[in-house]
Amino acid sequence: MARYHDLALLQDASGVVLTAFCAAVAERMLDVYAGMVDEGELGWAEDSLERVWKVVAAESDSDACAVALEIIEAETSSEENCDSGSSFYAARILDLLGLALESALRPDFGKAEFVANTAETLLSSLDFALSGERTVTYRPGEQLPPPGPLVSRDVAADAEFFEVLRRAGLSVGAPVVPAAVVSEIRRVSRDVGDEYCRAVMDVISMDS
């Protein structure tokens, strides 16, 4: 379970809002992904996420998402596990994309929770690298140490996601998210992603 993200508002969310949340988290990470992969891989990831957003806006069915998910599953099953460096970051971002695609097919709260946990793992790792790899330990029962700046920003980005819905007059139980609201969620998410990219490019460059 993610330690810092509070997803209580999503407990009663509709499937489409749960999918929008998963897609928003993946969208935040695409700029970082762009710094680690070639143009073809990035284009495919962007196209796949676009398919999820079309499902959210009720502009398309989920068939295309199922095809994209099969490709991701085949790709990840053939790759070796890597627990550090840019390969680790790229793999976690692909995990986020895969979860967004899965949510377009079968949305549930557990997937949204898994997305938050995966994003937190990724950003915590980047915070760790940016801090000069200084380990912070705590004992069970003690108050958690404060999150790093990237994790803190992601928690704030979750709140911005809910605020976009609120400003549009939508509850988390909305049966559809109109295209105009999807565009605003994506804009806000990309702005966050730009912040992440500027913060971590030196780390990614060193690991490449």
Image (cartoon, helix red, strand yellow):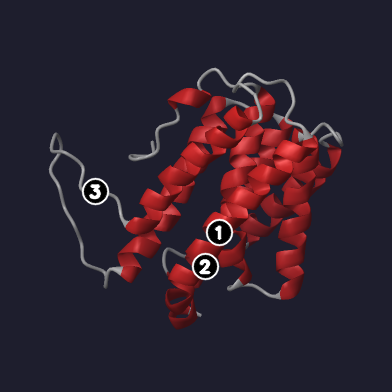
The Cα–Cα distance between marks 2 and 3, rounded to whole angstroms, is 22 Å
**Residue 93 visible in the snapshot:** no
Q: For residue 12, what is the image quadrant?
A: top right
Q: For residue 102, what is the image quadrant?
A: top right
Say which residue label 2 marks. 197
**Left or right of 113 on screen, residue 172:** right
The Cα–Cα distance between marks 1 and 2, rounded to whole angstroms, is 6 Å
Q: Secondary structure at mark 3?
A: loop
Q: For residue 34, what is the image quadrant?
A: bottom right
**Left or right of 77 on screen, residue 181:** right
Residue 28 numbered tag: none
Q: Amino acid at mark 3?
A: Pro
Say which residue label 3 marks. 146
Say which residue label 1 marks. 193
**Which residue is at a point 33% across and 39% down the rendered structure image?**
3
In the rendered image, residue 90, in percent from the top left (x then y), is placed at 56, 64
Q: Secondary structure at mark 1?
A: helix
In this view of the protein, which residue sits in the foreground, 112 or 63? 112
In the rendered image, residue 10, in percent from the top left (x then y), is placed at 52, 25
**Left or right of 135 on screen, residue 66:** right
| Quarter of the image that includes the N terminus | top left
- Neighbor class of circle 2 (other Cα within 10 Å; few <14, some 14-19, many 20+) is many
**Residue 179 visible in the snapshot:** yes
The Cα–Cα distance between marks 3 and 1, rounded to whole angstroms, is 21 Å
Q: Is residue 25 above or below residue 167?
A: below
Q: Amino acid at mark 1?
A: Gly
Labelled pair 1, 2 in contact (Cβ < 8 Å): yes
In the rendered image, residue 46, in percent from the top left (x then y), is placed at 73, 58
- Neighbor class of circle 1 (other Cα within 10 Å; few <14, some 14-19, many 20+) is many
